[in-house]
Image (cartoon, grey):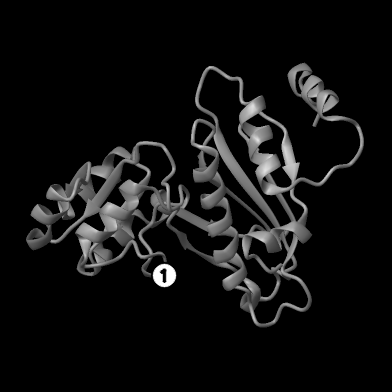
Amino acid sequence: MALGKRLQDVYKDLGEEKRFYKLSEAIAGIKRYAKCKFDESVDCALVLNVDMRKTDQHIRGVFQPPHGLGKQVRVLVFASPDKEAEAKSSGADIVGGEDLVDKILSEGKVDVDVCVATPDMMMHVGKLGRLLGSRGLLPNPKLGTVSNDVARVVKEAKGGRVEYRADRAGVMRVALGKASFAENALKENIVEFIKTIVQARPSGVKGVLLKKVFVGSTMGPAFELDLKLLSEEGISC
């Protein structure tokens, strides 16, 4: 894909030679070149040494950034009647039971960032499998979004949570904050995320898990990290 003039100028400013960056240098670069009128997201992309044809090498889960994601998160809860009050008091934006399922089914749309369900509601939420699944919103016990502890799950979702999984090529991309965050906050979010992935290393992986790591902002350049220097952050590739 051809780069726009702005990014061409940025990469020219950075220099033509291939460079690997220390994390602190990359974060400083992100903040330097995040010049858009909106607060750009800061993204992290990991190229993993996994064979996605083997199910035992899939990496999927949920990460709670220590400094959040810097955005408002709309949460919908499919709750049994005895859990509706708890869901509302915990800050959920939309709460309902079977009637909510039917409403969404008839309208064919849902405008939220996270869907949560109590276990006894899943037999009804299943009707929305195609609609919610295509948007990555279907509640899933493995991701912690099917639970009777509604207050905790809603609080975590509101605080910012990242659902991660590698694509077919073994590449994992997630947003981990905003360009307006303090450098230390961005650094901690990124470091803790990479540590989480390394700790989730499948037993069948041979050699290093991390092949490449990039960080950048929505409209800015991508900075490839020097993997050897990640050890300074307590990360073993």
> Residue shown at 40%/36% (left/top)?
71
Q: Residue 1 in the image: state x and y as whole percent.
A: 80, 32
Quarter of the image where one finds residue 201: bottom right
- In screen coordinates, is 199 left or right of 15? left
For the question of whether residue 219 can be seen, the reply is no
Residue farthest to the right, as pictured: 17
Q: Residue 39 in the image: state x and y as whole percent.
A: 50, 26
Residue 136 against residue 195 in the figure, above or below = above
Locate the C terminus and report the quarter of the image it occupies. Answer: bottom right
Circle 1 — which element? Answer: helix
- In screen coordinates, is 114 left or right of 65? left
> Residue shown at 79%/26% (left/top)?
3
For mark 1, does the 10 Å Cα neighbourhood hold few (<14), some (14 to 19), or many (20 or more) residues? few
Q: Residue 70 in the image: state x and y as whole percent.
A: 42, 38
Residue farthest to the front, as pictured: 232
Quarter of the image where one finds residue 24: top right
Residue 36 against residue 183 in the figure, above or below = above
Residue 141 against residue 46 in the figure, above or below = below
Q: Residue 227 in the image: state x and y as whole percent.
A: 76, 58
> Residue shown at 21%/65% (left/top)?
149
Question: Disc 1 designates what residue?
Answer: 142
> Residue shown at 27%/44% (left/top)?
104
Residue type pointed to by label 1: Lys
